[in-house]
Structure formats: structure tokens, C-alpha cells
Amino acid sequence: MGYIDSVSPIDYQSVMMNALAHPIRSLRQAGAVLRARRSERQISQKQLGEMTGTAQSTISDIENGVVSVSLDVYLRLLEALGAELSVTDRLVDREPT
């Protein structure tokens, strides 16, 4: 397991808030990125659910990394938050400096 996989969801959210790109290597990290974007825009889980037709409980499960959803659902949530998915070459795991 690399450094990025050992970061807690709260720490990951804090670290990634100021980054332009959000590397996602796990469901937990995907959820943390989604939560950070939603919080940054001051949108509640209920509001995001209404915007996307997704149950609030599902959004909570996604943000906590306990459920896997289709790519379509994740893209719809990102779109509602003004974000998009992109793919880049994987960076080598590195310890924080």
C-alpha cells in the first residue's frame, strides 16, 4: 500500500482542497473528492440528490467510500458540482515532504 492509500478521508480532503488535480485510487478517495467539491460549493447532500436524481443516502455512502456506483452516476454528480473526470499518467507514490 502506498502513501496515498494510507491517508485518512479527512486528511485527504484537506490536502486535496487546494490541488488542481485530485488523484483518485480508491472509492474512499473518490468519495472524499466528491465531498470536498460539494462542501466547497455549500451544497447539501439533499440538494445534490435533488439536482441529480440520486438519493441522499446514496450520496452519503459514496462520500464515505462504502458503496460503488456506476460511472454514469459519478459523472452526473461531478457535473452537478462543476467538475469532470480526466485521466492522466499515474504519479509514483511518494512520501510527503
Image (spheres, grey):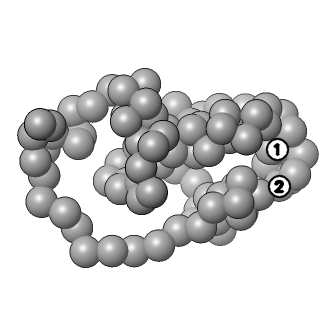
The residue at the point 23 percent across, 40 percent down is: 5
Viewport quadrant of the N terminus: top left
Callout 1: helix, strand or loop? helix
Callout 2: helix, strand or loop? helix
Disc 2 marks which residue? 52
Tell me if I can see residue 67 in this picture: no
Q: Amino acid at mark 2?
A: Thr
The residue positioned farthest toward the right in the image shown: 50
Which quarter of the figure has residue 23? bottom left
In this image, 69 relative to 97: left or right?
right
* Number of numbered discs overlaid on the protein picture: 2
The residue at the point 71 percent across, 54 percent down is: 81
Name above or below for residue 24 compared with residue 38.
Answer: below
Name above or below for residue 89 compared with residue 80.
Answer: below
Which quarter of the figure has residue 16? top left
The residue at the point 23 percent across, 42 percent down is: 4
Disc 1 marks which residue? 49
Asked if marks 1 and 2 touch (Cβ < 8 Å), the reply is yes
